[in-house]
Image (cartoon, rainbow, N blue to C red):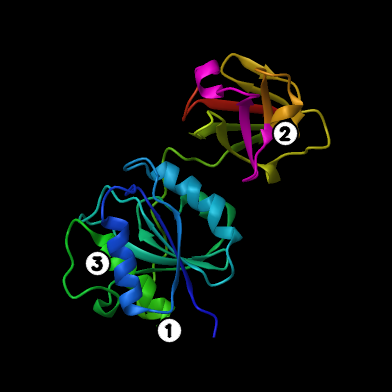
Amino acid sequence: MVAPVITLTTDFGDGDPYAAAMKGVILSRCPEARIVDLGHGIQPRDIMEGALFLAGAVPYFPPGTIHVAVVDPGVGTDRLPIVAKAAGQIVVCPDNGLLTLLTHLHTLEEVRAIENPAFMLDEVSPTFHGRDIFAPAAATIASGKNVEEAGTLLNAIELLDELPRPCLEEEGHVEGAIIHADRFGNLITNIHRSMLNENVAITTRVGDTRLSTLLRTYGDAPPNEALALIGSSNFLEIAINGGSARDRLGLDRGDSVDLRW
């Protein structure tokens, strides 16, 4: 039997015991689990960054992988803990928009509220659902419990209002927005490769910058020059070869992007 894989993505950082406590709960319930830290460096309470992180990582894991994502500023409120099936994977997380971008790219096969006490610890803290609900739910599923036993089937989930789908205005014209600036200052947009015709000339306008070519990689532009390209997550990026597009262009999350070809 192949050991189940459980991944962890949080905004907990590395200096506190929160992620370690979740691992302890998982291994107590499912000792054979292989725990993979995807990252604990999501900016605190930044659901948008968490949504982008999940969309970029989840599809590359083996089918049946269980992903636990905890970026949860509403912990203890009426937001639901959920378990969802998408892209051949299982995601355990709060219903607060973390799945927004993943659902833009992949069909949600099933979503259930986590209501069954068997999927939780005996005592649930109102401030640490990562340890008391999400970790034990993931371990319980990894140990063989069916997702159907978690709780009520949901017909819809919460989506981030600030992460709208890009709008296809007409054939050859897409309007989108910057949704993230990575640590290099590259500006990642919500325009997916599948919306473009890369076989013709593409013009990108962002702020006061106009880029008339879609390049293959960063080094195809002269040093310190702006460029547009399709990044490794298959979203359109605006970058500076050797620099920060966020700093140089004065742009950030929410700024609009206009694409024509």
Tally of marks: 3
Magenta region, residue range: 229-250
Asked if residue 163 is among those painted magenta in the image, a careful observer would answer no
Q: Residues within 10 Å of mark 2 (few under 14, many from 20)?
A: some
Q: Calculate the distance from the C-alpha at mark 1 to the C-alpha at mark 3.
A: 19 Å
Residue 217 x, y percent position in the rendering: 72, 33
The residue drawn where x is 26% and y is 73% is: 120
Q: Residues within 10 Å of mark 3 (few under 14, many from 20)?
A: many
Q: Which numbered tag is attached to residue 144?
A: 1
Q: Earlier in the sequence, mark 3 or mark 2?
A: 3
Residue 123 x, y percent position in the rendering: 16, 71
Which quarter of the rendering shows the C terminus?
Answer: top right
Q: Are marks 3 and 2 in contact (CB under 8 Å)?
A: no
What's the amino acid at mark 1?
Answer: Gly
> Quick check: 35 above or below 98?
below
- For label 3, the residue is 132
What's the amino acid at mark 2?
Answer: Thr
Badge 1 element: loop
Q: Quadrant of residue 43?
A: top left
